[in-house]
Amino acid sequence: MPEEELLCALRAGSELALQTAMQTYGAYVYAIVQNRGAGQLTGPDLEELTADVFVRLWQNRARIQGSLKAWLGAVARNRVTDELRRGRSLLPLEEQTLAVDESVWDGLAQARRRELVRSALAQLDEQDREIFYRTYDLCQSSAQVAHQMGLNAATVRTRLRRGRQTIRAWLEEGGIQHADDL
């Protein structure tokens, strides 16, 4: 079912449209939740947040404008960010204990690495940043990225390789020497 028809059916209150949306976009939403969770969420937490995105879809179906996929992606990213920002760890108690024992310095080092990665990404041109975003944030294949951006898949792979080289050089200048340092 085309996205526009799906949105119309959702706005009309069709539960079948909700099921279709879950089947069509469930893996996409789960991948975003998993990636944004950065290893801080358990399997059940990932499933709960993914399900919550679709609950919000149902609750807000009449107000959705534009692309359904983009809306779902934004809601998924925001839900994970909200959960992590609340400071409530969704990890089991044993892992919470270990996380509390980590040094403050480790947190500062992680923040510095994140800032270096953001700065390195800023060195890329807009099209390369879009390719990186689609590949690493939306988990799209080179073929999908190429199709959606009107490029050749080989071009996408080449730009990813060159972008990684640029980022690697930028990170090395910032003091990160190995991928393990990330």
Image (cartoon, rainbow, N blue to C red):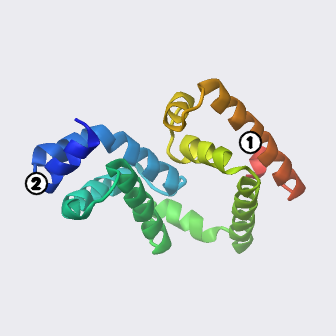
For label 2, the residue is 12
For label 1, the residue is 163
- Residue 79 is labelled as none
Residue at position x 85%, y 47% in the image: 169
Check disc 2: other Cα within 10 Å, few if <14, some if 14-19, many if 20+. Answer: few
Residue at position x 22%, y 35% in the image: 1
In the image, 133: left or right of 52? right
- Dot 2 or dot 1: first in sequence order is 2
Residue contact at pointers 2 and 1, CB within 8 angstroms:
no
Residue type (three-letter) at the residue carrying disc 2:
Ala
Q: Residue 54, position in %: x, y?
A: 26, 54
Element on which disc 1 rests: helix
Element on which disc 2 rests: loop
Check disc 1: other Cα within 10 Å, few if <14, some if 14-19, many if 20+. Answer: many
Q: Residue 144, position in %: x, y?
A: 49, 32
Residue type (three-letter) at the residue carrying disc 1:
Gly
